[in-house]
Image (cartoon, rainbow, N blue to C red):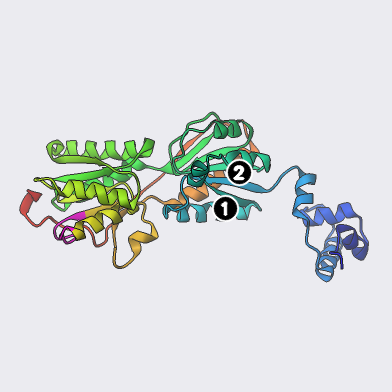
């Protein structure tokens, strides 16, 4: 048995196909009795609009392409939740692609989004330079979320205030008494902003000589290896501020394997306030970078850009907050020396 069509609905309701279309689009130009007749016919017949046909008639796909730097990053869960909730409110659906997988396969799914004629594109996280992304941004309304790059014409950027967040983390460690503090640094512009803020705060407190920066790679393994290097030095730090929660979990593992108790022997601060930080056996002190808010604001920026593609690009920053939990405390010896 064939599924009901819009023609069947029109015949059952005793109206034209165009009037059925107006009702299905939520138009307010239909008399209440006609609207009720159409909705009753839809219910009786079990009619479901054909999304593909509707896209062709409206010249819109009602989809948004979302390209993530790495789908394994738990911070994206919060961001995507905020993003999807706002898009859903506007009748749009997300299509996800994993940038890490793209690089592994030697493909660029940005072109796939373009071929699918998505209404907009959101790049989430720090992505490597991409000619396809630049080309797509010139043709499709585009927003960068949770990162500061790439900077492209007419592309909005919605991110956390990374300098402020790093300052909160560093000042917290200094306030509880630490002086020998290390930072496991990230990559890209975000990594540079957090590292620079860490160094600035340490300098403001006269602690330049005891500030240590160790490069990481944003992963748990990278945090583990960086911490092993830091704790293998004669003047090991008494506290570590990691670029993100994942690296901080690696730092926690390294400390425990080396026989150190957190926070008695070593204080740790992460960044992102992911679900990992809230696990009871981890309970990380971390910086909440307002991932859900970043997602909702990025979605709103995209909706605004779809409505007005020529408006000037904006940089919008959300305010971070420090979440103090169980991995920070005063150093064992006065002054952290």
Question: Residue at label 2?
Answer: 303
In magenta segment, residue 264: yes
| C-alpha distance separating marks 1 and 2 | 9 Å
- Name the image quarter holding residue 311: top right
The chief SS type of the magenta part is: loop
| In-image side of 23 versus 322 (left or right) | right
Image disc number at residue 40: none
Mark found first going from the N terminus, 1 or 2: 1
Q: Position of residue 169 (x, y in %)?
A: 26, 48
Q: Are marks 1 and 2 in contact (CB under 8 Å)?
A: yes
Look at 70% across and 46% down and name the residue there. Answer: 61
Residue 182 falls in image quadrant: top left
Residue 92 versus residue 236: which sits nearer the camera? 236
| Residue drawn at 57 percent across, 38 percent down | 142
Count all numbered tags in the image, as a single digit.
Answer: 2
The range drawn in magenta is 258-267
Q: Is residue 248 left or right of residue 255?
A: right
Residue 141 image offset from top left, x and y in percent: 61, 37
Q: Residue furthest front?
A: 105
Question: Dividing the picture into quarters, in which one does residue 258 lie?
Answer: bottom left
Task: Report the side of 200 relative to 5 (left or right).
Answer: left
Residue 269: image location, x then y, percent:
26, 53
Residue bearing the label numbered 1: 86
């Amino acid at each position: 048995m064939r599924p009901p069509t819009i023609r069947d609905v029109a015949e059952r309701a005793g109206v034209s196909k165009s009037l059925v279309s107006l009702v299905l689009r939520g138009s307010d130009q239909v008399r209440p009795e006609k609207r009720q007749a159409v909705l009753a016919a839809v219910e009786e017949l079990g009619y479901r609009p054909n999304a593909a046909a509707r896209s062709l008639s409206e010249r819109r796909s009602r989809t948004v392409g979302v390209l993530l730097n790495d789908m394994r990053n738990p911070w994206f869960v919060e961001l995507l939740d905020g993003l999807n909730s706002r898009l859903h409110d506007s009748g749009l659906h997300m299509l996800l692609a994993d940038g890490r997988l793209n690089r592994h396969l030697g493909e660029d799914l940005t072109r796939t989004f373009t071929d699918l004629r998505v209404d907009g594109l959101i790049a989430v996280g720090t992505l490597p330079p991409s000619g396809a992304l630049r080309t797509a941004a010139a043709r499709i309304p585009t927003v960068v979320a949770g990162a500061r790059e790439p900077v492209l014409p007419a592309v909005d950027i919605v991110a956390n205030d990374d300098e402020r967040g790093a300052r909160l983390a560093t000042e917290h460690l200094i306030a509880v008494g630490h002086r020998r503090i290390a930072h496991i640094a990230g990559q890209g512009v975000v990594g540079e902003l957090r590292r620079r803020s860490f160094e600035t705060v340490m300098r403001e407190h006269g602690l330049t000589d005891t500030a240590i920066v160790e490069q990481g790679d944003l992963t748990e393994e990278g945090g583990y290896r960086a911490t092993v290097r830091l704790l293998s030095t004669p003047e090991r730090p008494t506290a570590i501020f990691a670029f993100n929660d994942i690296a901080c979990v690696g730092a926690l593992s390294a400390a425990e394997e080396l026989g150190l108790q957190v926070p008695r022997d070593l204080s740790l601060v992460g960044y992102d306030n992911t679900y990992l930080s809230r696990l009871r056996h981890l309970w990380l002190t971390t910086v909440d970078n307002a991932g859900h808010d970043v997602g909702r604001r990025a979605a709103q920026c995209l909706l605004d850009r779809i409505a007005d593609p020529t408006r000037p690009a904006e940089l919008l920053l959300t305010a971070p907050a420090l979440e103090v939990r169980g991995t920070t405390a005063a150093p064992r010896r006065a002054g952290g020396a």
